[in-house]
Image: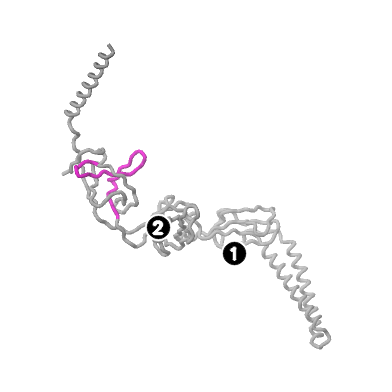
Amino acid sequence: MKQNLSTAMTMIVVATSLIACRQEETAPPAKPVKVNFMEIKNDSHAQEFTYSGTIEPENTALVSFAVPGVIDNILVEEGQFVKKGQLLANIDDTEYHHAFVIASAGLTQAEDMYRRLTSLYEKGSLPEKDFIDVQTKLAQASANREINAKHIRDSKLVAPIAGIISKKMIERGSAVAPAVPAFQIVKTDKVYARAAVPESEVGKLVNGMASGVFVKTLNETFYGKITIINPQADPVSKTYDVKVKLDNTSGRLLPGMIADMAIRTGKNVDVIRIPAKAIVRDADDIAYVFITNDQNKAVRKRVEVKGITGENEIIVTGLNIGDKVVVEGQSRLKEGILLVASL
């Protein structure tokens, strides 16, 4: 009984397979898809390197008082533009003024003593050793007065550069100490666009190369030249900082803005360019194109986009000279489908 059932099942499977094979043999082949081709040929293009970077101020100064004290007045706020030499804040200088008065009195006394004893020394009535002591005390008194005068000047904090107050770290009534930052000033009439350049490309860049810097926030391209190529690589990323200086007299470029830098080396290199419309992207945003093989069948080939030209063409890698790329009709294609050229 079991043997008969097994035999019957085998016959059913065989029959089903035969039917499926006959259906495949009789199924009509897929219709060829009409497309337009473009054959890849030798081409050259101005060598250009593109990087993503940020805008940085030309100079950043941390400003601090040179003497200790208590803040008496603050004259600027964050975001305010200041000129070089402009007064920013001052501390209570009462103590320094009193010390200056005392030092001035000591200098007056030392000068009087020097004048009186000089005549005695010239007459030979004063030993040379005592006269040298008088000269020393006069020099000390003069230096002491100058030091106290400087303390009074240092009680007023002025801007060392022209720029914008980006940080204020003090408040009225707070105590300050030397070398403790009170303000941060950024100089932004000139700015840098800074990008990290890989080792494989930094050797092709030199100071003076022109660069376009597109700032998406402003939807505008600014132009400048490479002025700094850091000779020391980042120890982690092994990249080199390259900076392009930009004019910013309008003040529109602000530190921290994202910038796309395009640096042209002035040389031409062989490239493969295809129309932008030939590019297809899958659900994972991977770019690919369709090419035709010797049997005129569609072959999907992944490409990597390297740049965009002004003629709405894409510079890619992943294709070879002689490849026939589908430039129209690719949206209807699948791998292996038969292709026919549109008339």
Give the vertical position of 255 relative to 136 (above or below): above
User: Taking 208 as reference, is 137 left or right?
Assistant: right
Residue 176 location in percent, x, y? 68, 56
Q: Give me the residue at 21% from left, 42% from top.
A: 35
Q: Considering only order in the chain, which callout, 2 or 1, is on the residue closer to the N terminus?
A: 1
- Quarter holding the N terminus is top left
Q: Distance between the residues labelled 1 and 2?
A: 43 Å
Of residues 295 and 155, the one drawn nearer to the viewer in this rendering: 295
Q: What residue type is labelled 2?
A: Glu
Q: Give the range drawn in magenta.
A: 271-298
- Which of the 4 quarters of the picture holds residue 113? bottom right
Q: Look at discs 1 and 2 and give the one toward the viewer.
A: 2
Q: Which amino acid does label 1 sit on?
A: Gly
Residue 281 included in the magenta stretch of the image? yes
Give the vertical position of 213 relative to 288 (above or below): below
Residue assigned mark 2: 201
Give the vertical position of 148 relative to 119 (above or below): above
Neighbourhood count class around disc 2 (C-alpha, 10 Å): few under 14, some 14–19, many 20 upward: few
* Residue at the limit of the structure toward the right, as seen here: 125
Neighbourhood count class around disc 1 (C-alpha, 10 Å): few under 14, some 14–19, many 20 upward: few
User: Taking 6 as reference, is 167 left or right?
Assistant: right
Residue 22 location in percent, x, y? 18, 26
Of residues 310 and 81, the one drawn nearer to the viewer in this rendering: 310
Colouring scheme applied when the structure was drawn: one colour
Residue 278 included in the magenta stretch of the image? yes
Residue assigned mark 1: 85
Query: Which structural element holds mark 2?
Result: helix
Of residues 72 and 327, the one drawn nearer to the viewer in this rendering: 327
